[in-house]
Image (tube, rainbow, N blue to C red):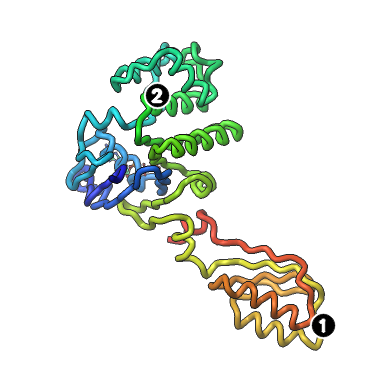
Amino acid sequence: MNAIEAKQLSKAYGAHQVVMGMDLTVRKGEIFGFLGRNGAGKSTFINMLTGIISSSSGTYSLLGVEGPDSKVMKRVGVMPDYSSLYGSWTALDHLRFFSELSGARASKEKCLEVLRSVDLLLHANKKAGKLSFGMKKKLGIAQAIIHDPELIFLDEPTSGMDAESVILIHRLIKELQKQGKTVFMTSHNLDEVEKICSRIAIMRDGVIDKIGTMEELRAFYRSTITVKIKHSTVPKQEQAKLKQWLESAGSLLEHGDAYTVITISDENKIAEIIRAFTQCKADVLRVEVEEPSLEEIFLNE
Ligand SMILES: Nc1ncnc2c1ncn2[C@@H]1O[C@H](COP(=O)(O)OP(=O)(O)OP(=O)(O)O)[C@@H](O)[C@H]1O
C-alpha cells in the first residue's frame, strides 16, 4: 500500500491552472522531498491532499483510502501554518487541543514528551504569541506528530531555525522514518533535501518536472562530474600528449603545472585519467570528484 497516490490531480482558479494533472506515488516509509520555485503549486497540491481545498479534477488516496476522507485524516499529521497558532494559548494547550481534535487525546506526559522531542519542553507553558518564529515552527511540527500519525506533511519544517535546531529536526524526521512513518516535506533548502530525503520531486508550472532518488536525478546530469587533480609537474616532452588525451576524455577546464580540472560524463573515466598522468610520468597527489548537486539539478531546467 502506498502512503500517497495522486492521479491526474488538478486545480484551477478560474482560468488559472495551478496544478495540471499531477500523478504522484509516495511509498510508505519514505522521506519525500517536494521542491519547486515560489508559486510552482506545491502548497496547492498539498492542500488538496490534506482536504484544505477541493480539487478541480482527478483523484487521490492517502494510506490506501480514497480522499477526501475525514477518518483517514486522523492517521495523518499536517504541520499548520505558524500564523494559525492561538497567541494566548500555551504550547501545551495547543498539543492537547490538536490531539483531541484527532481523537487521540494525548496525556500531559505524552504532550511533554513530544515538546521535548522538538526542544520546547522549557517553553511548554509559554503563550504561543510569545514564542520566537523558530519555536512556532517547532510547535507546528509537534502538532503534526502529537497523535502518532502514519503519514506526516511538513511544510518547510526548518526554515528560520538556527543550525542546532535544524540538526535536531533532521534527527527527529529520520527517527519518524525509523518508526515506519512516511514524511512528505517541502523545503527551499536544497542541502537539507539532499541530506535527508529518500526521493525528491521537483514541481514546475503545475506539473512534476523531475522525480527520483538523488542517484537517479544525478544520472541525468552525469556530464557534469567534475574531477580535480593535484599532481606533480608533467615532464616537458609528455605535456602535449597528456593535454591531447585529456581533451579527448572530457572538457578540460583548467590544466596548469600542478592542478588540473576536467568534467567528464562517465565515472569510469576517473581511473583512466589517473593512469594517463602516471603514464606521462607525473605523480597524482590528490583527486577530488564532485557530482552534480541538487542545486545544479534544480537550476538545470
Ligand atoms: N486561492 C487562490 N486563488 C487564486 N490563485 C491562487 C490561490 N492560491 C494559490 N493561487 C496561485 O497558485 C499558484 C501556486 O501557488 P502555491 O501557493 O501552490 O505555490 P507554492 O509552490 O506553494 O509556492 P511557495 O513556494 O511560495 O509556497 C500561484 O500563482 C498562486 O498565486
Amino acid on which disc 1 is placed: Pro
User: Is residue 19 left or right of 271 when viewed as pictured?
Assistant: left
Whether disc 1's CB lies below 8 Å from ligand 1 is answered no
Judge whether 204 appears above or below 219 on screen: above
Residue 92 is drawn in which quadrant? Answer: top left
Residue at 49%, 11% in the rendered image: 125
- Does label 2 or label 1 sit earlier along the sequence? 2
Q: Answer with left or right where residue 210 lies relative to residue 197.
A: left
Image quadrant of ligand 1 equals top left
174 or 292, nearer to the observer? 174
* Residue 25 drawn at (x, y percent): 31, 50
The one of 150 and 12 positioned closer to us in this rendering: 150
> Residue 93 location, x and y as percent?
40, 13
Residue of label 2: 146
Which residue is the site of mark 1? Answer: 235
- Where is residue 261 shown, x and y percent of the image? 67, 70
SS at circle 1: loop
